[in-house]
């Protein structure tokens, strides 16, 4: 995936988040601040404004710009977390003119580690990591077995969706949702949900 395609993917992610912002906010109303979809849509709206100016940059610069914009424009926890994730991906891809599957996996791991550090969280705490970590592991496993990118991303998306379902079964221990304790059980995590939407867009473009 070169810069032109990456920019197209980011535009599609922005469109998806905008179209699903009410649903994501509804999820967050139950266990969070009630602003996940609205904030994320606003952030990606600002991201879109900067994409044309990045057409001649390498993919790393595009991802860095996405991350910095989300950090500066998205309120709540999701801005710093997603922003960190995109910036870490950009750092991992520095100097590469094209993102290949192996490069993506390396960058994906960097994003996960950045989010873990920023959020002081790990898998099993009802956060976006409950979709991200299984997705990365599934993509990597499938890629190593067959080197078929389409199949690998399909496996990753399936794992992310399972992760979203898993978040319904556990109590939150991080963020605003943790205040609810066991009352958060039965509700899916908004961050895991929005991440899965993003990964589906990427998978469609592989």
Image (tube, rainbow, N blue to C red):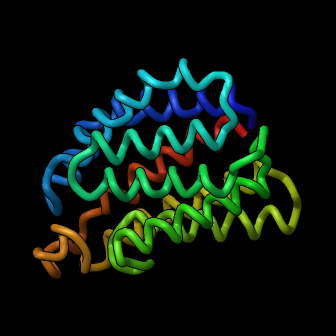
- Left or right: 3, with 132 as reference point: right
Total numbered circles: 0
Q: Nearer the viewer, residue 166 or 53?
A: 53
Which residue occupies 51% across, 52% down? Answer: 87
Q: Quadrant of the C terminus?
A: top right
Which residue occupies 66% across, 30% down? Answer: 57
Report x, y in % for residue 192. Answer: 40, 59
Residue at the farthest right position: 146
Give the quarter of the image for residue 147.
bottom right
Report x, y in % for residue 109. Answer: 61, 66
- Left or right: 187, with 136 as reference point: left
Report x, y in % for residue 15. Answer: 43, 27
Q: Quadrant of the N terminus?
A: top right
- Left or right: 186, with 167 as reference point: left
Residue at the farthest top position: 52
In the rendered view, would you say 141 is above or below 206?
A: below
Which residue occupies 21% across, 45% down? Answer: 25
Which residue occupies 44% across, 66% down? Answer: 115
In the rendered view, would you say 63 is above or below 82?
A: above
- Left or right: 52, with 164 as reference point: right
In the rendered view, would you say 155 is above or below 182?
A: above
Report x, y in % for residue 4. Answer: 68, 25
Give the quarter of the image for residue 76.
bottom left
Give the quarter of the image for residue 183.
bottom left
In the rendered view, would you say 77 is above or below 66?
A: below
């Amino acid at each position: 995936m070169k810069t032109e395609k990456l920019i197209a993917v980011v535009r599609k992610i922005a469109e998806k988040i905008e179209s699903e912002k009410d649903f994501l906010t509804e999820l967050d109303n139950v266990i969070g601040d009630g602003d996940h979809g609205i904030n994320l849509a606003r952030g990606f709206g600002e991201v879109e404004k900067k994409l044309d100016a990045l057409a001649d940059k390498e993919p790393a610069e595009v991802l860095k710009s996405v991350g910095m914009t989300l950090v500066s424009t998205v309120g709540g926890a999701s801005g710093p977390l997603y922003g960190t994730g995109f910036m870490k991906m950009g750092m991992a891809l520095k100097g590469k003119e094209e993102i290949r599957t192996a490069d993506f996996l390396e960058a994906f791991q960097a994003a996960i580690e950045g989010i873990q550090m920023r959020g002081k969280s790990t898998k099993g705490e009802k956060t976006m990591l409950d979709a991200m970590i299984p997705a990365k592991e599934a993509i990597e496993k499938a890629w190593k077995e067959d080197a078929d990118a389409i199949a690998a991303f399909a496996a990753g998306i399936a794992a992310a969706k399972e992760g979203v379902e898993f978040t319904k079964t556990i109590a939150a221990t991080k963020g605003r949702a943790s205040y609810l304790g066991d009352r958060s059980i039965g509700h899916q995590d908004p961050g895991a949900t929005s991440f899965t939407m993003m990964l589906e867009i990427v998978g469609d473009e592989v």
